[in-house]
Image: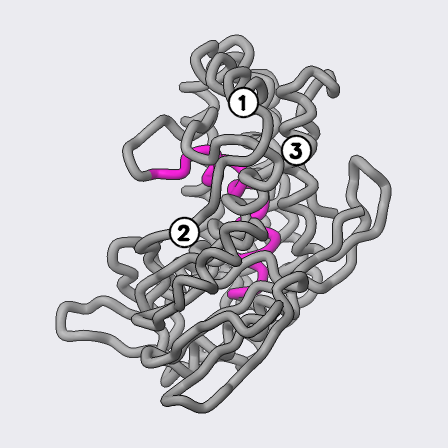
Amino acid sequence: MRKLLNTIYVTTDNAWLRKDGANVVVEVEGTERGRVPLHLIEGIVCFGRPGASPALMAACAESGIALSFLTPHGKFLARMEGARSGNVLLRRTQYRIADDPARAVPIVRGIVVAKAANQRTVLRRALRDHAGSMKPEARALVEAADVRLGQVARHAAQSDEVAILRGYEGDAAQVYFGAFDAMILGERTAFAFNVRSRRPPLDRINALLSFLYAMLGHDCRSALESVGCDPQVGLLHADKPGRASLALDLMEEFRPVLADRLALSLVNRGQVKADDFRIDDGGAVTLTDDGRKAVLVAWQDRKKRELRHPFLGESMPLGLVPHIQALLLSRHLRGDLDGYPAFVWK
């Protein structure tokens, strides 16, 4: 079983990353702030304008360590990676399936049904944990969304067209986010949520979700590259220049599990406050430096939680599941598995 390795998050603008022997060293204004052995790392994510030495970049490329650069708000800027890994025959098979709707449908169907099921689990856990704290109309809204998502999942399970499945995925998102505000109990005024907004996020919940999705996207892309798949060519998400469509496909199963549930917990437990966000003159909302650090600590803790994988029946850290799903997908593409077992959270 693969080990869950660490991802290093660098949030200080004037930080400098360098290689010292077999270690990554992070310096700020000439002072060493951290040192981690390369063999314990699977990724380095830099926010803002940290720099990295050529020797470190070469070591990361040789070791398969993803080095990504994001804006302070979590928007992807660039990624450095080494030579292509994996079997070219696997990628050619991936491309053929992406161009053949009949072969893509079973995979897409599994992803859409699993996402709707995982969204239902978020709603049901909110009812289990906080039903007594919800207003009656909020509780009724969550319960109705739970029922509707079950209907969407059943219809999607019987669909045999990618375009129709994309429509069901959109329906599920509309229902789910329509009930999202009802699950927010902490600082109701500051964390009110009306609709999903992305570029830019227009409220604190959207800013938090977008930041967590950026972290999840990094992990899913790394997982796909580690097994030899091409993260740019998707099945559910259509091809688009500059978009890692297959990574977005893989993300759909995990958005409710890793990101949405964590966002609700951070707000409802008071781990992030209203003043952990800033609002610019144009209305865009972003995390402050302190807020971003608090979320990253919680993100790493969330990934360490153990669960039993529903298909393999083995216990593992939650952060390892995207790598397992990428491996299962590659095995299906190669013909070693009859179908792709999408991840359903229980």
Q: What residue is at 70 percent from the left and 57 percent from the top?
A: 4
Neighbours of disc 2 within 10 Å: few (<14), some (14-19), many (20+)? few
> Dot 3 corresponds to which residue?
342
Give the label, 2 or 3, closer to the camera.
2
Amino acid on which disc 1 is placed: Val
Residue 149: percent from the left, percent from the top? 56, 38
The CA distance from mark 1 to mark 3 is 24 Å
Judge whether residue 50 is colored magenta. Answer: no
Mark found first going from the N terminus, 1 or 3: 1
The CA distance from mark 2 to mark 1 is 20 Å
Q: Give the image quarter of residue 332.
A: top right
Q: For this view, does 251 lie left or right of residue 336? A: left
* Whether residue 312 is situated above or below residue 8 in the rendered picture: above
Is 29 or 126 nearer to us in this picture?
29
Q: What residue is at 66 percent from the left and 55 percent from the top?
A: 319
Q: Main secondary structure of the magenta part?
A: helix
Helix, strand or loop at mark 1: helix
Residue 69: percent from the left, percent from the top? 37, 60
Residue 324: percent from the left, percent from the top? 69, 41
* Segment colored magenta: 243-263
Q: For this view, does 30 lie left or right of residue 7? A: left
* Whether residue 330 is situated above or below residue 30 in the rendered picture: above
> Dot 1 corresponds to which residue?
88
> Dot 2 corresponds to which residue?
80
Is 29 or 218 nearer to us in this picture?
29
Q: What residue is at 58 percent from the left and 78 percent from the top?
A: 35
Amino acid on which disc 2 is placed: Met
Is 117 or 227 nearer to us in this picture?
227
